[in-house]
Each structure stands twice: as structure tokens, then as C-alpha cells.
Image: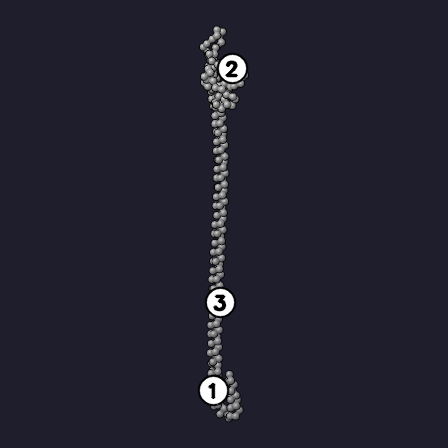
Amino acid sequence: MHLSFYALSSVVFIFGNSSQKKRHAKASIIVAVLAFILCGAFAPTTKTEADSSEAQASLSSKKKADEAKKRSESIASSAKAESKRKAREKKAASEKKTSEEAESNKAASESIAQAQASSESLARAESERVAKEEASRASESAKVQAQAESESVAAAQTAADQSSTVEPAASNGGGHPVNNGDMNTADANAQGVIVGNANSIIYHVPGQRGYRMNSSNAVYFNTEAEAQAAGYRKAYK
């Protein structure tokens, strides 16, 4: 630009100080010089503008590439974060399901255990009840049997006592039996002693009816407790 200014100044100076013909010749030279100068002056500018345009295009392309890269990285980061979030949610859901299943299984096990314990308790109670009933029936049966046996033994002992103290075959002529034993229990009872018959295992106390018996079978006691301790029972009459 400075060269163009100087060239124009020179043209004005030459045209102001030359003749007509010289002016034409000089004008042609000056035009050529100006053309050369102008071409030289504007060529770098055009190149600079082209370089600037290319630089701007390169910067724009680079900027777009950077922006695209950032968008891609952002999308990838978002996708990665979303994937992690879904993985965490899936893990949490799985853990929750496992925990719920464990709680459900625990509750079911406890319910089964309680039902089993209740069933076992009822079974024990029923078994104890049945055992008690059977024991009660057995006890009653044993009591009835023992009573029957006692009555049978008592009847047998009474019969034996009567057979040992009364002579059934003898008669005094009036149809009454005659006792042939060498002693009467009433005589011993009159002295305040208790007389037992070793043959019949029966004892007689003072105040009861006297029976004749052999003195070899007589056993004497001071009290009924002594007689009973020895296995004797009291005579019915």
C-alpha cells in the first residue's frame, strides 16, 4: 500500500514537469511500473487472506472435531453412568429379592417349627391322658381283683377256722356239734390275751364268741397290732 502511494505521487510529479510526448512515454512506463507494484502489493494480501481463510477453516474444523469428540465423550460418559446406575439398581433389586426370599423362608420355617411343636405337644398331652386313663383302669381293676381275692381268702380262712374249731361229725344227741379241741379261746380271752390259730391264721379277741381248738395251734398276742403284723386277721364272730 505504501508503494502504491509513492507511485501515484511520482506520476503526478512527472506529468506536472514533462512535455506532451514525453508524458505519454513516461505514462506507459509508469503504468507498467504501477501494474507491477500493484500486483506485488496485492498478491501477499490475497495470499494472507487465503492463509487466514484456511486457518479459520482449520480452526473451525478442529473446533467442530473437538466439539464432536466432547459430545461423543459426553454420550459415552452418560451411557457408562446409565449402565452403572442400571447395574446398581439391578444389584439392589436382586439383593432385595434375596432378602425378601430369606425372610419368607425364615417365616415359613418358624411357622412349620411352631406347628410341629404344637403337634408334638398335643401328641404328648394325648399320650399322657391315655396313659393316665389306662393306669386308672388298671388300678381300679387291680383294686377289684385284690378285693375279690381278699374276700375269697377271707372266706377260705373263715371256713378253715370254723373247720378247725368245730368238730362237725360229733353230736351231743340234740343235733349240735361238739368241739373236741383241748382248749377254748374264750378262756384265754378272759385272761386279757389275744389267741391266734396258727392253722387258720385267725385271731380271737376278748368279748368274741369262744371256739374250741387244739392248744398246739394256739399263738398268743398282747395287741391286735402284733397279731396283724404277724399276718393274722381278726375273726368275724
Q: What's the residue at 47%, 56% (across, down)?
A: 87
Which is more N-terminal, label 1 or label 2? 1
Q: Amino acid at mark 1?
A: Val
Question: Residue 33, which numbered label?
Answer: 1
Establish if 175 lies above or below 42: above
Between 114 and 63, the one nearer to me in the picture: 114
Establish if 46 lies above or below 8: above
Which secondary structure, mark 3?
helix
Which secondary structure, mark 2?
helix
Badge 2 vs badge 1, beta-carbon distance below 8 Å = no
User: Can residue 80 be seen by looking at this rendering?
Assistant: yes
Residue 85: percent from the left, percent from the top? 49, 57
Q: Amino acid at mark 3?
A: Glu
Which is more N-terminal, label 3 or label 1? 1
- Label 2 environment density (alpha carbons within 10 Å; few <14, some 14–19, many ≥20): some
Please name which of the two marks, 2 or 1, marks the residue nearer to the observer: 2
Total numbered badges shown on the rendered structure: 3
Question: Residue 51, which numbered label?
Answer: none
Would you name the residue on which mark 3 appears? 67
Would you name the residue on which mark 2 appears? 187
Q: Whole-Å distance between the Cαs marked 2 and 1?
A: 196 Å
Q: Amino acid at mark 2?
A: Asp
Please name which of the two marks, 1 or 3, marks the residue nearer to the observer: 3
Establish if 3 lies above or below 124: below
Residue 74: percent from the left, percent from the top? 49, 63
